[in-house]
Image (cartoon, helix red, strand yellow):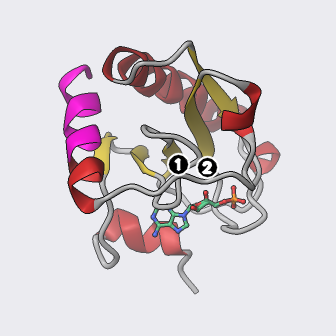
Amino acid sequence: MASIFSKIITGEIPSYKIYEDDSFLAFLDINPNALGHTLCIPKKETDQIFDLDDKTLSELIIFSKKIANAIKKAVVCERVGMSVIGLEVPHVHIHLIPINSMNDMNFNSKIEMTEAQFIETMNKIKSYI
Ligand code: AMP
């Protein structure tokens, strides 16, 4: 069965897409740790990041760098943190999280965002890509 992220790629499930190319997609995390929390995924479905072939893994990191640099410009933060977990969705994803304190990397501490805030944040990050 296709992962929830594969359904986001095809548009079967709505998302706040920031940027995509032939192989990768970046979109806002729906339950963010911080405003601007973004996920970068390979379009080809693989469960665990270290099962990716070297080329795809390197390209995913380089893709994530492009997105992180845009997040840094769009969102007021000290830096952009990066994390890989994957306990919830078995489709490789890199979390990019604008952080000001260690607590922003705490996945048990979430923020509430309105639809309007998601759209505004998506558009702002997009404008820096
Ligand atoms: P994990 O697999 O533990 O790295 O967490 C999966 C992440 O995907 C969580 O941060 C979720 O909030 C996020 N997530 C799950 N479903 C969606 C969705 N439909 N759109 C955007 N983000 C999602």
Main SS, magenta residues: helix
Q: Nearer the viewer, residue 21 or 110?
A: 110
Residue at the location (81% across, 44% down)? 50
Identify the element where label 2 is drawn: loop
Question: How many other residues sit within 10 Å of disc 1, few (<14), some (14-19) or many (≥20)?
Answer: many
Q: Nearer the viewer, residue 103 or 98?
A: 103
Q: Is residue 20 above or below residue 62?
A: below
Q: Is mark 1 within 8 Å of ligand 1?
A: no
Q: Quadrant of residue 104?
A: top right
Q: Position of residue 105 (x, y in %)?
A: 71, 37
Identify the element where label 1 is drawn: strand
Residue kind at label 2, given as amino acid type: His
To which residue does mark 2 refer? 93
Q: Are marks 1 and 2 in contact (CB under 8 Å)?
A: yes
Q: Position of residue 97 (x, y in %)?
A: 57, 34
Q: Residue furthest bottom?
A: 1
Q: Quadrant of residue 94?
A: top right
To which residue does mark 1 refer? 41
Residue kind at label 1, given as amino acid type: Ile
Q: Is residue 58 visible?
A: no
Q: Is residue 84 visible?
A: yes
User: Quarter for ligand 1?
Assistant: bottom right
- The residue range painted magenta reads 120-129
Residue at the location (66% across, 67% down)? 89
Residue at the location (59% across, 46% down)? 33
Image quarter where the C terminus lies is top left
Question: How far apart are labels 1 and 2 at the CA level?
Answer: 5 Å
Q: Is residue 103 above or below residue 62?
A: below
Question: How many other residues sit within 10 Å of disc 2, few (<14), some (14-19) or many (≥20)?
Answer: many
Q: Which mark is residue 112?
A: none
